[in-house]
Amino acid sequence: MKLFKSNEWQRVKKSKAMVIALAVIALIPSLYAVIFLSSLWDTYGHVSNLPVAVVNQDQTATVNGKTENLGQNLTTSLVNGQDWKFTQVSEKTARSGLKSGKYYMTVTIPSDFTKSSGTLLGKSPKTPTIDIQQNGGRSFFAEKITDAAAEKLKNKVSQSLQKVYLENLLKGTKTSQDGFTKAAKGVSQLGTALGKVQTGAGQLQTGTMTLQTGATTLSNGLLQYTGAMGKLTNGSANLVTGNTQLAASLQKIGTGISQGQAANAANISKLNAGFDKVNQGLQQLSQMQVTIDQSQLNSSAASVSSGLSSVDQNVTAVLADPTVQEKMKTDPAFAQQVSDLKSNLTATEKSSQDLKTSSAALNTAVMQQISGLKTQLTTLSTQAITLNNSAKTAIQQLNDSLSQVANVLATQAAPGATNLAQGATTLTNGLGQLNGQSQTLNGGATALSTGTSQLVAAENQLTMALQATQNGSDQLAQSLANGAVKLSVVHTGTKNVQALTNPVKNKSTSLSTIANNGTGMAPYMMSVGLFVGMISFSTAFDFITLGKKPKSGMHWWAEKQTVMATVWSAQAVIMTGLLVLVDSMAPKHILMTFVVALVTAFAFNQFVTMVIVALGKMGSALLLVFMVLQLSASAGTYPIELSNSFFQVIHPFMPMTYSVDAFRQVISIGGLAINDLLVLLALGLVSMVLTWLMYHRKLQADTVLFPKTAEK
């Protein structure tokens, strides 16, 4: 090729050492990129070889009624897993191994791990703790990897425990629902008992009305009887006073007695009928039995109290769980359901208390009224019986006396004056006895009226208490029904437990993917390799001296580029080719990857040439400093935002900033890197023009000595 026949190549070929040096320099970028990247090309793919020690100190304990050793279960899962190289060892071995570097991390499961796990739904939950230790001084990178492992391990254990306790929580919810159902049944039984009490109250009210009717009839009969007794008393007085006129008036008196008997016959019949009704009412009242099934009321109240107690305990346990608290914070719908459940429970408890209070008040009032009523009925019954017997006896005596008077008047009118006086005296005595019995009868009637009034008042109180109790029972039944309905929407299947254990799934997408660690670091190391290759080239190759004096600055540059272009082109092509062939790099755009490598090598070569031509050996030293700045400011390893402000400021002015981004575009992202290539081409062209000018100035100043043989 004509390129290798240039004067500069002919001068280089004279020195075999220079040819070998240039060949080695052409491989320098490959040494940096290919060999270094191959050592860590797929580091994350070999994480399973990273040794980690597991120390299980856990003791067997009872969790939810079952004997468990969660620490041993976890240890077995880790050792048999494929994520890391877990090995179960003693505490002493783990400690010494971590110190010596045999293990990069130790996982210690404490002795109370299972016991603490069993308290998560208790009154005083204790969070189980796993002790993880690392030795970052051995390897910072390994520490970061084990950090991720520790977080993954924590999440794995947390999900395992969440699954167990969510199952128990859902079972508790089911138990709460059953408690609501039992409480509702208890309320129904209570309603049935209240219905029986209301039936008894109705019967009591019917008997009271009958008693009140009899008392009214008795009172009316007593009024009529008292009026008749007044007339009889007046007649007796006249009889005693008119003894002197008895003989003449016997006929008239007999006639008056007969008329009086005829006139009072109807009243006496009414009085007897009233006595019969009173006796009938008293008989019905005494036979009436009012019973309240207190045992059934107590049983129903106990059922309600038991159900509510079970509900309260289960709901309190559910709400105390940290997982549920977290769920309430992150899920507003779930938090609203919990709030509604609390409100219904509060209303239910209030209704239960109202029912309990009403039941106690009802029981006390009814028992007091029934006790007083029984006492009054006993007294009233005794008095009424005595009164009836006395009244009947008095009426019978009155009728007998009147019959005797009529008989005497009819058979012994003339000689009966003396007997008439005696009969008048007897009549007066009988009337006195009858009047005494009338007072007793009036007192009994008054007591009967008072008792019936008290009984009516008690019935009213009983009716109001029963109504209040019925209302409370309805409210309680409604609250229990609402609670049962809301709990019925909570399902307790395996899928529900799984969904609550992992309530959120990550759906992440990326505009581009990196196959492995080597592919991710390749843009950075390729840029570093090419820049280092150019610096190495500048130390071995003379950028100034030519075999003969050039015609111009451009000719001078062109002669040097016959060798330089061969070297930087070889560096770019060999490095990229070996990465594809040896390290199996698979760029998104393989052809553009070679283009980016060539453009980058061209830009770096022109830039390095410009600095060396301008500053000589001092330029080489400055290029090393500049390379260090580029390593820090090009964002090749970490995002530039993680660096300090100085490197963020110089970041846009570093050539490697654009070469790294260009390689990323064509290797991993799939872009064309047009903007980056334009910047690199601009850098190369500007450096190239400046190099021409500096060569031209040196040529004009004649500051360079060329070999004499070259001038001939």
Image: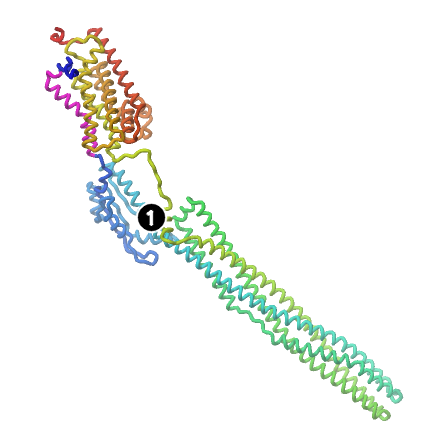
* 472 versus 591 height, above or below: below
State the residue at coordinates (51%, 56%): 479
* 512 versus 499 height, above or below: above
Of residue 46 and residue 493, the one placed in the foreground of this image is 493
Q: Is residue 30 magenta?
A: yes
Viewport quadrant of the N terminus: top left
Q: Judge from the rendering whether residue 286 lies leftward or rightward of residue 24; answer left or right.
A: right
* Residue 268 in sight: yes
Q: Amino acid at mark 1?
A: Gln
Residue 540 in which image quadrant:
top left
Pointer 1 residue: 159
Tell me where the magenta segment starts and ends, as one range: 12-39
Give the image location of residue 654, x and y in percent. 29, 22
Of residue 33 and residue 540, the one placed in the foreground of this image is 33
State the residue at coordinates (25%, 36%): 141
Dominant secondary structure of the magenta stretch? helix
* Residue 632 in sight: no
Q: Is residue 318 magenta?
A: no
Give the image location of residue 668, x and y in percent. 28, 31
* 267 versus 710 height, above or below: below
Secondary element at image label 1 = helix
Give the image location of residue 443, x and y in percent. 70, 75
Within 10 Å of disc 1 (Cα), the crowding (few <14, some 14-19, many 20+) is: some
* 43 versus 225 height, above or below: above
